[in-house]
Image: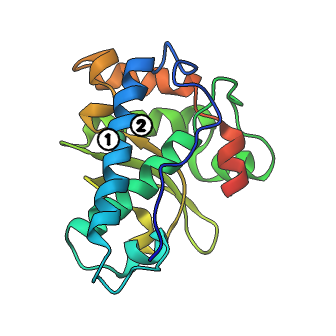
Amino acid sequence: MKTHVLPQLPYELDALAPAMSRETMEYHYGKHHQAYVNNLNNLLPGSGLEDASLEQIIVGAPQGGLLNNAAQVYNHTMFFLSLSPSAKKEPSGPLAEAIKRDFGSTEALRDQIGKAGAALFGSGWVWLARAKGGKLSLVSSPNAGNPLVQSLTPLLNIDVWEHAYYIDYRNRRPDFLTAIWDIVDWAAVEKRF
Ligand code: MN
């Protein structure tokens, strides 16, 4: 059986402050993300998906704990690896062209992500995703959702579960969705694109 592990981060836990404090990282990465990894490893034996990749589990597992925990491992790994204390603050090259084509501008895209995140009822994720033909779109997914199940390629995701912002922003989800752009590293998104 494949054993899933918490990914190492290329920055220190206090490096994303003030947008995301050390305490938030200690809980969100150190406890929540770790718990999803542990749950996944505990649920895999006997599932028939012991050696599957996270992507294979997300598109192939039935509704339930295994699917939810595998998706949350994937989702959090993408989220934390999209952040950097030395973030590239604007996309460039082909990604910037595609954003301009499909959203008008990067500023308009950020604004739409903020609005989608504020409007998402309860826990979930807002995604920038790419369809097979190349068109970019936003996806709002509740709970552990992931655009892979819609045959879309995830490029960027923003966690809007309360655990992502409650320590630093309390109930002010929109403030979190504004501050996050200080640490979203468009270089990471360009690589996925
Ligand atoms: Mn989270």
| Residue wearing tag 1 | 32
Does residue 177 sit above or below 131 in this rendering? Answer: above
Position of residue 90 measured from the top left corner of the image (x, y, whole percent): 70, 32
Q: Farthest right residue?
A: 93
Instruction: Tell me the kind of residue under disc 1.
Output: His
Q: Quadrant of residue 73?
A: bottom left
Q: Is residue 105 left or right of residue 167?
A: right
Mark 1 neighbour density, 10 Å: few (under 14) some (14–19) many (20 or more): some
Position of residue 81 measured from the top left corner of the image (x, y, whole percent): 58, 43
Q: Colour mode?
A: rainbow
Instruction: Tell me the kind of residue under disc 2.
Output: Tyr
Q: Quick one: 68 or 154, which is closer to the camera?
A: 68
- Give the quadrant of the C terminus: bottom right
Q: Quick one: 61 or 174, which is closer to the camera?
A: 61
> How many numbered marks does the figure carry?
2
Q: Quick one: 138 or 41, which is closer to the camera?
A: 41
The mark found on residue 29 in the picture is 2
Q: Quadrant of residue 185?
A: top right
Position of residue 79 measured from the top left corner of the image (x, y, whole percent): 49, 44
Does residue 34 sit above or below 69 in this rendering? Answer: above
- Mark 2 and mark 1: span between their CA atoms? 6 Å
Q: Quick one: 116 or 60, which is closer to the camera?
A: 60
- The reply to whether callout 2 and callout 1 are in contact (CB within 8 Å) is yes
Label 1 beta carbon less than 8 Å to ligand 1: yes
Ligand 1, seen in the image, is in the quarter at top left
Label 1 residue SS: helix
Position of residue 159 measured from the top left corner of the image (x, y, whole percent): 38, 40
Q: Farthest top residue?
A: 18
Residue occupying the point 62% across, 37% down: 106
The mark found on residue 13 in the picture is none
- Give the quadrant of the N terminus: bottom left
